[in-house]
């Protein structure tokens, strides 16, 4: 809707044309929010209809009061006329709440009128309200009318602000209509009838628009709830991922610690094995170590020559080897030592006639259990 002129002190005289006044008065009295944007489709294709609507726009722009449409939460849905004279944006976070946008002097009477209109479900007005505008203080009348569509449970409200200047213009309009010559009455009646028909169409269009807006608001609310739900799910997933990351980090730290310990243990075992090998090699004693299943575990370099062993014989069963000694049941005696845990001394000769003293001892592990046997061959020369 076109906005009203706002400069204080400006006087408006009644217009000099006839039938348009009566038509504008009918529109304003029956539907203050009617606009030229919702004009009847029947007039859209004719130049006469366009010119007529143009005249109506000029009349409404001069005489329609400032008003706003708010929803049940007092948030402004539509501004019409010179509403900026009575509302302004509040400092801070942006908000369309009407009560937060009212100028000085309007809050208390308008809040009381909204409450009364909600309780009575009828229009409520307040007169002679003093409000501070950009041009100083002025006296206005307030009217709050509840609006309700079938699809809506809560009420919307039409809030109209009428200053003394607006009332004066209305009186001038009525005085102008009283001076219209009688010869224009017939033509004005026809135009009023047409305007009433157009007004009915505008009301229907407004009702449909409100219904569509309610449906759109419902869809937007549903979409907002879905987005909120998705956001919460993503937040939960993010928290779970963060917890998993922390657990993985803890596990990684533990694995690093275990890996360092295993590395140190491996180094110690390597050093121990190297020392044991060097010790056996430097002692020049024939030593053959087997496990509980009589598989060869380790032997010294001296034992390699006496027992005719090869490095590849490690892991092979003792009874599968052809030892160069005159004791075919050596593996049976070694098993007996492992089972009873007692040492045995044997005197043997090899094929070359050299004599050896064999000592078969139990091989004890660190856990104090027999883990095999150790065979020591001593040359008796």
Image (cartoon, rainbow, N blue to C red):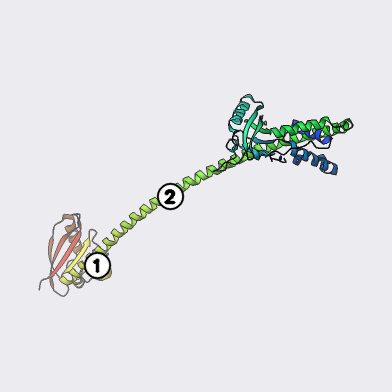
Of 265 and 67, the residue lying toward us: 67
Can residue 46 be seen from the camera position used here?
A: no
* Residue behind mark 2: 242
Of 271 and 217, the residue lying toward us: 217
Residue in the picture at 47% in, 45% down: 236
Q: Nearer the viewer, mark 1 or mark 2?
A: 2
Helix, strand or loop at label 1? It is loop
Rendered image quadrant of residue 126: top right
Position of residue 206 in the picture relative to residue 351 (left or right):
right
Graded by Cα atoms within 10 Å as few (under 14), some (14 to 19) or many (20 or more), the crowding at tag 2 reads few
Position of residue 201 in the picture relative to residue 363 (left or right):
right
Of 310 and 47, the residue lying toward us: 47
Looking at the picture, how far across and down is residue 253, in whole percent?
A: 34, 55
Going from N to C along the chain, the mark reached first, 1 or 2, is 2
| Mark 1 vs mark 2, CA separation in Å | 61 Å
* Residue behind mark 1: 321
Looking at the picture, how far across and down is residue 191, in whole percent?
A: 84, 34
Residue in the picture at 53% in, 42% down: 229
Tell how many labels. 2
Residue in the picture at 15% in, 56% down: 341
């Amino acid at each position: 809707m076109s906005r009203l002129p706002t400069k204080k002190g400006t006087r408006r005289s009644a217009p000099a044309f006839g039938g348009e006044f009566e038509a504008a008065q009918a529109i304003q009295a029956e539907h203050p929010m009617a606009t030229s944007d919702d004009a009847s489709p029947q007039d859209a294709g004719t130049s006469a209809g366009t010119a007529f609507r143009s005249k109506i726009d000029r009349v409404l722009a001069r005489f329609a009061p400032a008003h706003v449409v708010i929803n049940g939460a007092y948030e402004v849905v539509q501004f019409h006329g010179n509403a900026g004279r009575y509302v302004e944006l509040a400092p801070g976070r942006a908000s369309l709440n009407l009560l937060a946008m009212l100028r000085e002097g309007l809050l208390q009477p308008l809040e009381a009128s909204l409450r009364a209109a909600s309780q009575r479900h009828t229009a409520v007005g307040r007169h002679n309200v003093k409000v501070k505008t950009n041009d100083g203080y002025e006296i206005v009348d307030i009217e709050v009318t509840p609006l309700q569509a079938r699809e809506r449970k809560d009420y919307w409200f039409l809030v109209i602000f009428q200053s003394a200047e607006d009332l004066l213009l209305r009186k001038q309009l009525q005085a102008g209509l009283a001076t219209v010559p009688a010869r224009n009455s017939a033509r004005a009646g026809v135009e009023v009838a047409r305007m009433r028909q157009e007004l009915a169409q505008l009301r229907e269009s407004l009702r449909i628009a409100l219904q569509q807006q309610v449906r759109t608001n419902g869809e937007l609310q549903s979409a907002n709830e879905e987005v909120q739900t998705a956001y919460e799910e993503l937040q939960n997933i993010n928290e779970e991922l963060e917890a998993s990351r922390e657990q993985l980090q803890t596990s990684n730290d533990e694995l690093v610690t275990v890996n360092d310990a295993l590395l140190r243990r491996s180094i110690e075992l390597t050093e121990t094995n190297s020392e044991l090998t060097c010790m056996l090699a430097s002692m020049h004693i024939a030593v053959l170590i087997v496990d509980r299943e009589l598989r060869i575990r380790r032997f010294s370099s001296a034992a390699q020559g006496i027992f005719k062993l090869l490095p590849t014989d490690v892991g092979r069963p003792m009874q599968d080897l052809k030892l160069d000694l005159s004791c075919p049941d050596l593996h049976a005696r070694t098993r007996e030592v492992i089972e009873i845990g007692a040492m045995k001394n044997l005197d043997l000769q090899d094929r070359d006639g050299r004599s050896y003293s064999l000592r078969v001892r139990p091989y004890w592990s660190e856990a104090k259990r027999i883990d095999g046997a150790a065979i020591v061959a001593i040359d008796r020369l």
